Image (spheres, grey):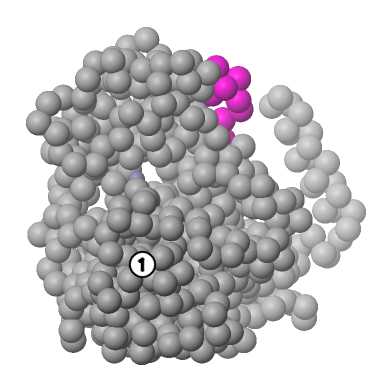
Amino acid sequence: MRKGLRSLRVACGLFAALTGTAAFAQQKVDTVVTNGRILTVDANFRIVEALAINDGRIVARGTSAEVARYAGPSTKVIDVRGATVIPGLIDNHFHFTRAVERWHQQARFEGVSSRREALQILAAKAVSLKPGEWVMVQGGWTPRQFADAPGGFTLEELDGVAPKNPLFVQEGYSLVYANSLALKAVGLNPADGARRSATGLVSFQPPYALYDAMPPASPAQLDQNLTDFMHELNATGLTGVYSLGQSKYLAERAAKGPLPLRLWETLPVFANDPASAATAAAVIERSRPNQFDGQYGIFGLAETLYRPFFDLAPRKDPWPAEIMNEYGKLATAAARAGWHIHEHVINNSAVTDLLDTLERVNKTQHIDRLRWTLGHVYDISPANIARAKALGMTLGVHGAAMQAGAHMPLRKIADSGIVFGLGTDATIVSHYSPFVTLGWVVSGLDVGGNRVLDETLTREEALIAHTRSNAYLFFQENALGSLEVGKQADLVVLDRDYMTVPAAEIKHIHPTLTMVGGRVVFSAAK
Ligand SMILES: [Zn+2]
């Protein structure tokens, strides 16, 4: 092997000698990004001015003068004129396809702190559609984010902004506000008001009666929605998301490639009882883990490995042994086959029970190199953080905790040294904007300016968690997550400086350009 490498190097040297001067001239690249304040987010958090990019990868970095040598006549030079540049942001927990399926009908309140503005957004969406077409907000907001007038929506407000279109606004999974046309469409009486519990609309998760009343998107519409939603996420600074679930249309689009957004998906397995768990374990054991090919692929198992272990409200009693034993069997199968698990767990008591099980699994089947992620962890004790770290595990901190108003122990998490990545859990229980998330963890404030965190992160810690640490969660630390030579050129140019803008304004930062693998996938100038 060694010998082979050496002779290859000799051969290259010989080739260079034969081609003469070209071998000694500076290599020219296809793209240069220059005059920036580029936060590389490498191990030293080094800041450089310029990057030379060739064939999607960074080949050099340094001062603008140093990197200028890489520019030839056919090099595309992107002069960012002093703007701050960061690595592409990665979201480690995203319900992506759910948003895509209804994207053409959706209005969103990401970062919107004024009720008046929210109503204007609804009105603008309604007039952009034909009369009778549905308008919806698929969650991602809270009544307290409207600093001028907190609260949900009245029938008069919703009828006022959409007099000709059925309209509903979901508040998480459990509540929905609908206008008269939407209520009538599902046989409800508008005289009872706009606010409904989603359970009253026969549903646990989205208010299905309303979803069922809407015509499904045609295949062509779905295709357009996918394009538009990926573009929207690029415009918010995202270059990769962990899309929980699997979908044929994503696989088909990826096959046509290249995608403007790196997408990780989950293995389709379903374990609801001991019998289906046995089947799922067999599927897990015979499936190849981490099929991500650089832009797309099934990565891991998420977000409830064994459905009966689904942690929502805090419990008085530990999770029953018969449930945790089944979980242990599935986890053992996953560990044996080398699968990553990203497990939904909200309360510290459930974290304790899960870690008890995983420590037991680890005695017979090592999990400590698999970087399994405890996702959500609104509440987690320092002792449990240390136990998870000892198992080589990681944490997923999600914007949904802001929406829930959870007082997450972020300082304890950061100081523990465990690797933790940021994400959202979009789109129903969370916004999807990474800058809303970064603003929340740095300022401790929600979108409405309410203090929801007692413990916050430094700007550096937050940015690392949204980039490099997520690359680590996905075993991509050699390719993604920081702007270093040899890595993919996934980057975002910002309209203001993330490091110095007031913390409460981080949520208002907008990308002006987003690049994935050296390709510009979003430009505000266009
Ligand atoms: Zn979850």
The quarter holding residue 389 reads top left
Residue drawn at x 70%, y 56% is 253
The quarter holding residue 377 reads top left
Q: Which residue is mark 1?
A: 188
Q: Mark 1 vs ligand 1: CB under 8 Å? A: no
Q: Is residue 460 above or below residue 124?
A: above
User: Magenta span covers which residues?
Assistant: 281-290
Task: Tell me where residue 440 appears, x and y as whole percent.
Answer: 24, 66
Q: Main structural element of the magenta stretch: helix, strand or loop? A: helix
Total marks shown come to: 1
Residue most toward the right?
A: 18
Task: Tell me where residue 287 appears, x and y as whole percent.
Answer: 60, 25
Q: Identity of the amino acid at label 1?
A: Leu
Task: Tell me where residue 124 appears, x and y as whole percent.
Answer: 46, 88
Judge whether residue 472 is colored magenta.
no
Task: Tell me where residue 284 appears, x and y as whole percent.
Answer: 54, 23
* Left or right for 57, reference 449: right
* Left or right for 428, reference 128: left
Circle 1 crowding by C-alpha within 10 Å: few under 14, some 14–19, many from 20: some
Residue drawn at x 41%, y 26% is 272
Residue drawn at x 55%, y 35% is 267
Whether residue 400 is visible: no
State the quadrant of the N terminus: top right
State the quadrant of the C terminus: bottom right
Give the structural element (helix, strand or loop) at label 1: loop
Whether residue 280 is visible: yes
